[in-house]
Amino acid sequence: MTPAPEGIAALPLGLERDRHVHTRRHTPWVRRGAVVVMVVFIALALANIFGQVSDVSTVDSPAAALRVDSPTRLRGGLIFTSVITVVVHQKLQDAKLVLSPGWFDGMTLNAQAPQSNQQDSDAGGTSFDFGSLDAGSTMPVWISWQTNPTTVGRRSTDVTLEDGDKVVASVHRSVYVFP
């Protein structure tokens, strides 16, 4: 057993300084760097880099205006609401909202209000049939979603308003989901 250097206390019985004492010292810069990284991450989150704040996209046609109010950046597990508003300029006989497949890829639809008369899905997306809408009327549709925790990446979240088989208005959007 080596004796303790002058000014340093002796070790308890059975411990050796060379074998049991860690003598390498860490500089405070490692800890300071870790704190800076965490502060930058928090500042980016507060600046909405990682999602949740809604972005509004609108398109206006002679027959109707379509407004989509929904986040374009999300995080896994996030619960959010999209509001799709249709303002009718000319009577629509068979109004349908068609959401592209990206809305449902890695997302869970929790609720929709008002409920559509009929819902259908195909390769082009999921359509919600609302029937006849009179000129001058406004129809907001609230859809509650949750991003699945394992979802990551960019996807198309287009919304199209159709009158029967005729496209009246279409909003092209995309969403990016952070891990």
Image (cartoon, helix red, strand yellow):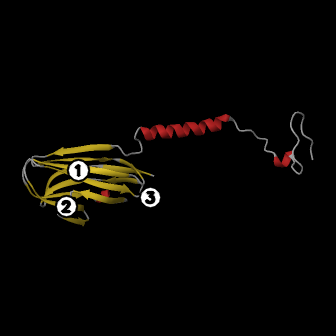
Q: Quadrant of residue 112?
A: bottom left
Q: CA distance from mark 2 to mark 3?
A: 29 Å
- Answer with mark 1 or mark 3, whichever residue precedes in sequence: 1
**Residue at the far top in the pictured view:** 7
Instruction: From the image, tell me which residue sits under label 1.
Output: 84
Label placed on residue 116: 2
Q: Residue at image x 31%, y 53%?
A: 156
Residue 110 sits above or below residue 53 on the image: below
Q: What's the amino acid at mark 1?
A: Ile
Residue 97 sits above or below residue 136 on the image: below
- Answer with mark 1 or mark 2, whichever residue precedes in sequence: 1
Q: CA distance from mark 1 to mark 3?
A: 26 Å
Q: Residue at image x 67%, y 35%?
A: 28
Q: Residue at image x 19%, y 61%?
A: 116
Looking at the image, is mark 2 or mark 3 nearer the viewer?
A: 2
- Sort mark 2 into few (<14), some (14-19) or many (20+) by Cα contacts within 10 Å: some
Q: What's the amino acid at mark 2?
A: Ser
Q: CA distance from mark 1 to mark 2?
A: 13 Å
Please tell me whether mark 2 sits on a helix, a strand or a loop: loop
Please tell me whether mark 3 sits on a helix, a strand or a loop: loop
Q: What's the amino acid at mark 3?
A: Thr
Residue 43 sits above or below residue 173 on the image: above
Instruction: From the image, tell me which residue sits under label 3.
Output: 150
Residue 73 sits above or below residue 6 on the image: below
Left or right of 80, for residue 129: left
**Residue 135 at x, y percent in the picture:** 7, 49
**Residue 8 at x, y percent in the picture:** 86, 36
Q: Quadrant of residue 53?
A: top left
